Amino acid sequence: MTVMVQHARVIRRKLIDRCMSAGVATVTGFEPASAPAANDRVHCAVVNGPGRTVPQASSLANSSVWQSFIIYLYLLLPLGQDQQQSMIDPKVSDARDTLLDVIHNPINYGSQVELDPLGAYGEPIRWAPGYYEQEGSKYRAETITPGFVAWNVWEQVRT
């Protein structure tokens, strides 16, 4: 197992814990394979997103890595509602706002990991509303994409 995999697991686990502690959604650590049961609750999934090495944050001996995660927030549209609404349900946007606050609050992601909110080494934190379908059901959705820098992940030079 590489050091980056360990960092990614730790960061993802802490993101899941933070999302759970916010209390605004039913949280899973994965994208659901099937549609969640119909209810009036916002659901949340946290999955790994794209990552890459960061030359400007690396040294001659070590490489640093930028890793993103995707936080999906979704709520089933009311039954019989065929058309997309002109706005995202306030429950979903309120959950998004709360989770953005929670992600930005001081958190110890590990001594060699930090949130990259402005995208100094990758993409800035992004969020976007939308809709998606799963198993014939339509969902109001929001995605949040935070990025993190893990310093000195891979050793490049052995002495």
Image (tube, rainbow, N blue to C red):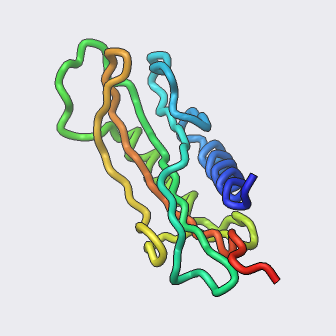
Q: Residue furthest top?
A: 80
**Is 17 drawn above or below residue 31 in the view shown?**
below
**Is 74 drawn above or below residue 117 in the view shown?**
above
Q: Quadrant of residue 106?
A: bottom right
Q: Quadrant of residue 74?
A: top left
Measuring from the top left, give residue 32's x and y in whole percent.
51, 27
* Residue occupying image coordinates x 37% and y 54%: 127
User: Which of 72 and 50 lies nearest the eye of the viewer?
Assistant: 50
**Is 119 drawn above or below residue 14 in the view shown?**
below
In the visual, does 85 lie left or right of 95? left
Measuring from the top left, give residue 76's x and y in whole percent.
38, 24
Measuring from the top left, give residue 58's x and y in whole percent.
60, 81
In the visual, does 77 lie left or right of 105? left
Measuring from the top left, give residue 144's x and y in whole percent.
43, 52
* Residue occupying image coordinates x 45% and y 24%: 40
* Residue occupying image coordinates x 40% and y 30%: 75
Q: Residue furthest bottom?
A: 60
Which quadrant of the figure contains the C terminus?
bottom right
Picture mark count: 0
**Is 141 drawn above or below residue 107 in the view shown?**
above
User: Which of 27 and 9 lies nearest the eye of the viewer?
Assistant: 9
